[in-house]
């Protein structure tokens, strides 16, 4: 029988994972201690070590959302969230990289078949970075199709290890009319500038992409608004329903798993340390009711965060299989629940931090790293609580979401 002190892996509410998907979850659970041991090295490097990158590739994590014709798993939506949770118990940066990089294969799967062939036809294990934050981009449409592109794009997770990148740009289509597009860039079309110096998610290597007057053919462009309706070239080319899901409504599931894993990892560490921890007056802290209440409240917050995402994963996949698009109220609710789940994780780690005392503030201690990391995850615009609450409140009261892509 398992000891009540032992920390179980996440108990997955969904009962529908396939055998291959369960194998992936088992690999993530097995890698978590190794990733935890490498976390200090990863923070010093400001990216994950090459060994972790190799482990993720060998496990097949980056291919779980890739179309099957290139060797991908075509998993249900949300497996990447679960894998991130498990890995992030040891290192949130590693969990973030896993789920974010994996979801980029899902986005590329919405592009025209020719674009997919150019990347995965050459290397089926090629991975894709992304940046949705442009700094002074310059876009010139070319006669006959395609664009010339220059500019800087910030915060591109795991970019040093990827073989291509997706960026977002505004393309003029007529006088005064602009269209937002995803732009697929092979590695030869951009250079990387090391700008990632932050206090949370330090090891994600989210550096800048610089593009200098490159030509991008039409088939490497994807209308962003087409991903709202699932009416994309890849959605037609790939039979699996996941490539016809709306992109931005459930996208936050690609981010929130790292917060849940980091919070659970913090709870794991605190419970383990309380086994022997005593105050300066030689009082066993685990016997103190206030400590017990903090542990209970943090555990409940983490479980509630997990349950919110699990409920929505079931809805996302069920509606996808039935080829039914969610209405606006459901779309903003997906974002609301992901934002609130992340908020719960921040609360949980804040609740645990005082138990760690002075030792929990040491730079090498996992608790302070988890505290920094959950706050960093919560800073992402797709999870920031005020933004999600405003979108939800506006739609429920008869208005529209601030972000039309949702």
Image (spheres, helix red, strand yellow):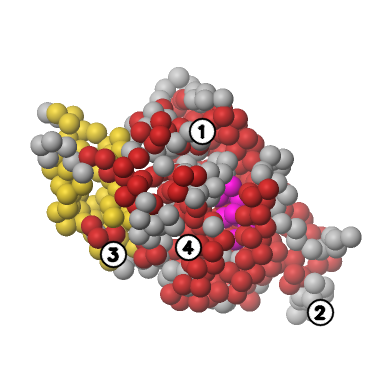
Q: Residue at label 1?
A: 241
Cα separation, mark 4 vs mark 3, equals 19 Å
Q: Principal SS element in the magenta part?
A: helix
Instruction: Specify few, some or many for label 3: CA neighbours under 10 Å numbering under 14, 14-19, or 20 or more.
Output: some
Q: Are marks 1 and 2 in contact (CB under 8 Å)?
A: no
Q: Residue at label 4?
A: 201
Residue at left offset 54%, top offset 56% = 61
Q: Could you say whether the residue bearing mark 2 is in a helix, strand or loop? A: loop
Which of the numbered marks, if any, corresponds to residue 79?
none
Residues shaded magenta: 79-87
Above/below status of 276 relative to 97: below
Note whether residue 251 is visible.
yes
Q: Are marks 2 and 3 in contact (CB under 8 Å)?
A: no
Earlier residue among tags 4 and 3: 3
Earlier residue among tags 1 and 4: 4
Cα separation, mark 2 vs mark 3, equals 53 Å
Residue at left offset 76%, top offset 54% = 296
Q: Are marks 4 and 3 in contact (CB under 8 Å)?
A: no
Image quadrant of residue 286? Answer: bottom right
Q: Residue at label 2?
A: 282
Viewer-nearest residue: 306 or 139: 139
Note whether residue 373 is visible.
no
Cα separation, mark 1 vs mark 3, equals 34 Å
Residue at left offset 22%, top offset 39% = 218
Which of the numbered marks, if any, corresponds to residue 192?
3
């Amino acid at each position: 029988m398992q000891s009540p002190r032992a920390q179980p892996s996440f108990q997955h509410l969904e009962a529908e994972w396939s055998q291959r998907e369960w194998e992936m979850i088992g690999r993530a659970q097995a890698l978590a201690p190794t990733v935890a041991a490498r976390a200090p090295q990863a923070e010093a490097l400001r990216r994950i070590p090459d060994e972790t990158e190799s482990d993720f590739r060998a496990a097949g994590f980056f291919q779980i959302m890739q179309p099957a014709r290139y060797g991908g798993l075509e998993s249900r939506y949300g497996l990447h969230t679960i894998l991130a949770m498990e890995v992030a118990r040891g290192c949130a940066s590693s969990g973030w990289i896993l789920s974010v990089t994996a979801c980029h294969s899902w986005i590329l799967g919405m592009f025209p078949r020719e674009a997919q062939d150019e990347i995965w036809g050459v290397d089926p294990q090629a991975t894709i970075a992304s940046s949705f934050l442009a700094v002074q981009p310059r876009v010139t449409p070319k006669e006959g199709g395609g664009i010339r592109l220059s500019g800087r794009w910030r915060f591109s997770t795991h970019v040093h290890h990827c073989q291509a990148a997706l960026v977002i740009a505004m393309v003029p289509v007529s006088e005064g009319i602009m269209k937002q597009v995803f732009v697929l860039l092979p590695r030869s079309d951009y250079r990387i500038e090391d700008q990632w110096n932050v206090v949370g998610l330090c090891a994600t290597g989210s550096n800048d992409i610089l593009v200098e007057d490159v030509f991008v053919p039409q088939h490497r462009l994807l209308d962003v608004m087409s991903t709202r309706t699932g009416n994309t070239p890849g959605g037609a080319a790939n039979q699996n329903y996941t490539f016809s899901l709306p992109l931005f409504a459930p996208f936050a599931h690609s981010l929130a798993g790292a917060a849940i894993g980091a919070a659970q990892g913090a709870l794991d560490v605190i419970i383990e340390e309380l086994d022997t921890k005593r105050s300066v007056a030689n009082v066993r802290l685990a016997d103190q009711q206030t400590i017990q209440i903090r542990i209970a409240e943090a555990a409940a917050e983490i479980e509630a965060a997990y349950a919110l995402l699990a409920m929505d994963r079931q809805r996302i996949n069920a509606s996808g299989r039935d080829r039914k698009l969610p209405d606006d109220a459901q779309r903003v609710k997906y974002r609301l629940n992901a934002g609130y789940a992340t908020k719960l994780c921040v609360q949980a780690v804040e609740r645990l931090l005082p138990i760690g005392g002075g030792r929990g503030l040491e730079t090498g201690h996992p608790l302070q790293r988890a505290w920094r990391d959950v706050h960093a995850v919560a800073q992402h615009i797709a999870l920031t609580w005020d933004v999600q609450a405003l979108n939800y409140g506006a739609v429920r009261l008869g208005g529209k979401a601030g972000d039309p892509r949702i």
